[in-house]
Image (cartoon, rainbow, N blue to C red):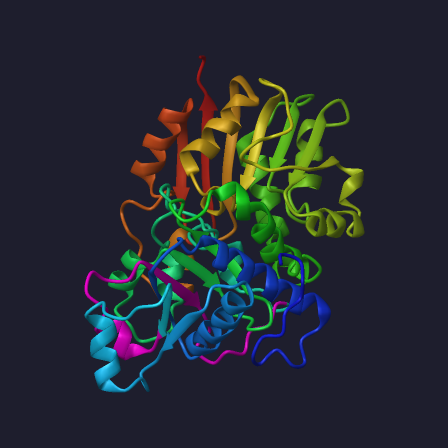
Amino acid sequence: MAGDVLHVPGSRGLTGEQARRWTEVLDHLAAALPAGAVTVLVDGGPLAGVVADRLSDHLAAAGRPCVRLTDRTPPADAETWRAGRGRPAIALADGPGWRAHPPNGGWDVVIRLRTRPNGSTRHNEPAHAADGIDGAHAADIANTGDSTNAADIANTADGADSANAAQAADIVVDLRDPDWPVIRQLAERLAPRERWYVGESRAFFGVRAASWDARFGDDLPAYAAAVREARLPAGGVAVDVGCGTGRALPALRQAVGPGGIVIGLDLTPQMLAAAVAHGRDSAAALLIGDARHLPLRDATADVVFAAGLLTHLPDPVAGLRELARVTRPGGRLVIFHPSGRAALAARHGRVLGPEEPLAEVPLQRSALRAGWHLDGYDDAAHRFLAIATRRPD
């Protein structure tokens, strides 16, 4: 049934593209649920019931009927379900009552929604977490793929205890635009990352590409300053991994000069199309590629530039290791963001933790494990800049 657009409650008024997006997400969610008897909680804001209803209909259409449990379920029936008696193959619940009082043994799968409190954001209004060094992703900080990241915690918007909620989440769905859901995290025990990661990442960034520079274009001087401070070698090979709309490419071209080579690589075709629209393809060759599996030979680059990349990767250490693979010994890695970590945390209403991937000590450890030596670290209010050198193998 993948690829077929199904009718879902509340879908009237969706464009064909939006309906297909919903179907793709529901396909992934349905495929991730284990076979046999399974209990599922959909949690996070006022849309939890809508998502649970859509998933229930989707499962039924696929031949997996389930019982819907809400806070309106009669108390006697609720106690029966909590005791584990009379369950069908799938019990699908939502509501604070079920969140506070799970069935015996707890929930087999928890789906958490990342929403806006007022539900107003649309996909042509990209949230800052999409560009944040401590947000996203994807899906995106936890190496195990089994817990949400800081942005997921900050954006549940459901009144639940955020820290405890995050520990229980198996799947995180970005629903800040109710017409454009995107899976940002899916536990590896439920589905291999290769099944969903690329498509969902492209869905997240693709709809934001055309308006990206309109929202973040005033960051261009900060990119240029970071490149100058990194002191790149003239005539070298510079690779911007996760280049997006190419905001760093003109500065990289100026740094390496006419005898150098600049490559901009991104997973999302729409981002590269936006780079072309802004004329930045004149500064660099543009490639579609996955930062986890770069389409480059070993020891190709003298410099790798990575702006807002690492926390969008499922495994930051593996990501650093792949960047090291394509970098010559003695080459440099520039990790950058035009806002400091504290400023981004304040923007999302959260407190920085000491073990976040871009905190200084964890980044030092990760860099060392991946073949880098961290030479410089500056987490100022106006920018984040870390520079590392590729160690000899």
Q: Is residue 116 above or below residue 353?
A: below
Instruction: Count how many numbered circles sit on residues in the image.
Output: 0
Q: Is residue 76 above or below residue 230?
A: below
Q: Is residue 157 above or below residue 190?
A: below
Q: Which quarter of the figure is the N terminus placed in?
A: bottom right
Residue 353 shows in this picture = yes
User: Looking at the rendering, which quadrant does residue 152 occupy?
Assistant: bottom left
| Rendered location of residue 78, percent (x, y) | 25, 79
Is residue 110 magenta-colored? yes
| Rendered location of residue 309, percent (x, y) | 52, 43
Q: Is residue 369 above or below residue 183?
A: above
| Rendered location of residue 89, percent (x, y) | 37, 63
Q: Is residue 332 left or right of residue 163?
A: right
Residue at 71 percent across and 40 percent down: it is 250
| Rendered location of residue 273, percent (x, y) | 76, 49
Q: Which quarter of the figure is the C terminus placed in?
A: top left
Is residue 264 magenta-colored? no
Residues 149 and 363: in front is: 149
User: Looking at the rendering, which quadrant does residue 14 occupy?
Assistant: bottom right
Residue that extends furthest to the top in the rendered view of this protein = 393
Classified by dominant secondary structure, the portion drawn in magenta counts as: loop
Residue at 66 percent across and 64 percent down: it is 20
Residue at 71 percent across and 73 percent down: it is 15
Residues 172 and 66: in front is: 66
Residue 373 shows in this picture = no
Start-end of magenta stretch: 94-123
